[in-house]
Image: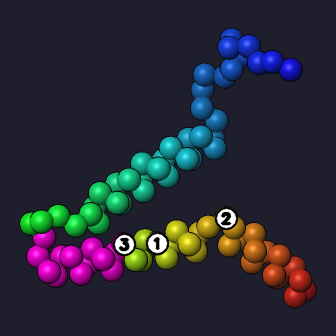
């Protein structure tokens, strides 16, 4: 079945809106923790810690991890 160009919905659905919002916030965060030449040593350390914290948050919120936890809890109960 072919989709005609006039049948494509021009509005973004909720998933695309959420992905766009997430992508914009992630880029904003990466820009904030980017180390520049003007940063002092304390700022570099702080940005490094913030970057690691952001990575940990992303891993904790990963859908793969959530699905794995649901399977693990289902196996226990």
For label 2, count other residues whose C-alpha is less than 10 Å away and answer few (under 14), some (14-19) or many (20+): few
Toward the bottom, the furthest residue is 76
- Give the structural element (helix, strand or loop) at label 3: helix
Above-or-below relation of 39 to 9: below
Q: Is residue 9 above or below residue 67?
A: above
Q: Earlier in the sequence, mark 1 or mark 2?
A: 1
Q: Nearer the viewer, residue 13 or 31?
A: 31
Secondary structure beneath dot 2 equals helix
Q: Of the two numbered discs 3 and 2 on the same chain, state the one appearing first in sequence.
A: 3
Q: Which residue in the protein does label 1 denote? A: 55
Q: CA distance from mark 1 to mark 3?
A: 6 Å
Image color mode: rainbow
Q: In the drawing, does residue 24 fall left or right of residue 7?
A: left
Q: Is-magenta flag for residue 45?
A: yes
Real-space CA distance between mark 3 and mark 2, rounded to the nearest whole angstrom: 20 Å
Residue 15 position within the rendered picture, expressed as x and y whole percent measured from the top left: 63, 44
The N terminus sits in image quarter:
top right
Q: How many angstroms separate mark 1 from mark 2 (CA)?
A: 14 Å
Query: Which residue is pictured at 60% across the width and 22% down the height?
Result: 10
Q: Given contact means CB atoms under 8 Å apart, are the residues at marks 3 and 2 in contact?
A: no
Residue at 17% in and 64% down: 36
Report the magenta stretch's main SS. Answer: helix
Q: Which residue is mark 3?
A: 51
- Residue identifier under label 2: 63
Location of residue 51 (image quadrant): bottom left
Determine whether 9 is above or below 47 in the image. above
Under circle 1, the secondary element is helix
Q: How many marks?
A: 3
Q: Which residues are magenta?
A: 39-51
Determine whether label 1 and label 3 are within 8 Å by CB: yes
Image quadrant where residue 35 sits: bottom left
């Amino acid at each position: 079945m072919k989709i005609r160009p006039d049948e494509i919905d021009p509005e973004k659905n909720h998933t695309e809106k959420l992905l766009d919002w997430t992508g914009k916030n992630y880029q904003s965060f990466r820009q904030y923790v980017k180390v520049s030449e003007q940063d002092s040593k304390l700022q570099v350390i702080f940005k490094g810690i913030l970057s690691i914290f952001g990575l940990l948050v992303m891993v904790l919120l990963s859908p793969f991890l959530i699905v794995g936890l649901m399977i693990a809890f289902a196996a226990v109960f």
